[in-house]
Image: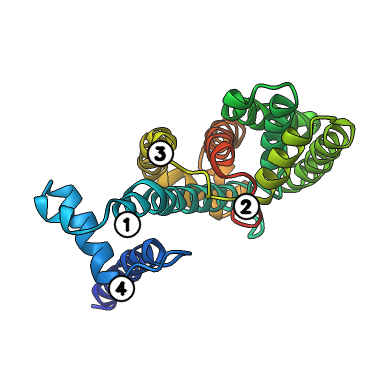
Amino acid sequence: MSKSKNDFKFILLLMVLCIFLLFSMLAGISLGAVRIGLKDTFNIISNSISSSESISAFSKSTVAIVLNMRVPRVIMGLFVGAGLALCGTIMQTTVNNPISEPYILGISAGATFGATLFIILGLKSLTGTGAFFGSVISTGIVLFIASLGKKITTTSLILSGAVVNALFSAFSNFIISIGANSDSMMTIKFWTMGSLASASWKDIDLPLFIIPASFIFFITQYRVLNTMLMGDEVAVTLGINLHRYRFIYMIFISMITGILVSKCGIIGFVG
């Protein structure tokens, strides 16, 4: 009886949060330099989805602002928030530490370094690629340092992440300090602040596939993740290969972080 009651509360809470999410998305699309009413915003979106001719009742500029500027930003914000929250949750479970997340463990710093390097080299179109490779390299270094004691532990991962975070942050700052191109410096400056301002429909396709696929993958891993929460000794006793699973999860996390950071820049304490 108690279990069914808890399940009901959880489902109810989930429904309430979903309603708040939809409302906040609608409000986020409505608010801005050009104020558009909630009703008008809803009508523009619904008419666009249904390909209704009623959308012609609104000015072209209003429709363009809603569909081409604000909707992509809000959708990107949804995927970035969900993806980085997923990364943080998995890292906290894997490392068994409540403050672990990509920013703390240096993955975001690696992605920033990769993107900064590519921007300085004049490869702005490949910024996402640079961020991805930077996150993978930083993850590899974290795992290498953490495994020097022949066994990856929670403490070794946290300390290794702190070292890598400081290292790649220093590299990024050094590149910025010697850069001579003012346009590149301005791009890096705004990019490292973290922003969804430049999000467009073409930026959403990769997160649209990666984030749901990652959620599905980690849902299938619930037994291993629940066992990891009990501690290293219990997990090993129950036959969990911690080294292998931590390696797999960290690679997934670095991939997600690299993709999302390349789209919106650094967002600390979420990712």
Whole-angstrom CA distance, mark 1 to mark 3, is: 22 Å
Q: Which residue is the site of mark 1?
A: 62
Q: Which residue is the site of mark 4?
A: 16
- Residue 240, position as x, y percentages in the image: 52, 38
Q: Amino acid at mark 4?
A: Val
Instruction: Nearest to the eye among marks 1 and 3: give it.
Output: 1
Q: Amino acid at mark 2?
A: Ile
Asked whether, in this view, residue 53 is left or right of residue 79, the answer is: left
Mark nearer the N terminus (4 vs 3): 4
Marks 1 & 4, CB-CB < 8 Å contact: no
Instruction: Nearest to the eye among marks 4 and 3: give it.
Output: 3
- Residue 202, position as x, y percentages in the image: 40, 34
Tell me, for residue 267, which label it has, or none.
Answer: 2
Question: Where, quadrant-wise, is the N terminus in this rendering?
Answer: bottom left
Mark nearer the N terminus (1 vs 3): 1
Residue at (33% x, 73% y) in the render: 13
Mark nearer the N terminus (1 vs 4): 4
Q: Amino acid at mark 1?
A: Thr
Residue at (62% x, 44% y) in the render: 265
Please tell me whether mark 1 sits on a helix, a strand or a loop. helix
Instruction: Nearest to the eye among marks 4 and 2: give it.
Output: 2
Q: Which residue is the site of mark 3?
A: 204
Please tell me whether mark 2 sits on a helix, a strand or a loop. loop
Q: Nearer the viewer, residue 160 or 132?
A: 132
Mark nearer the N terminus (2 vs 1): 1
Residue at (53% x, 49% y) in the render: 197
Whole-angstrom CA distance, mark 2 to mark 3, is: 18 Å
Whole-angstrom CA distance, mark 4 to mark 2, is: 26 Å
Asked whether, in this view, residue 39 is left or right of residue 112, the answer is: left
Mark nearer the N terminus (2 vs 3): 3
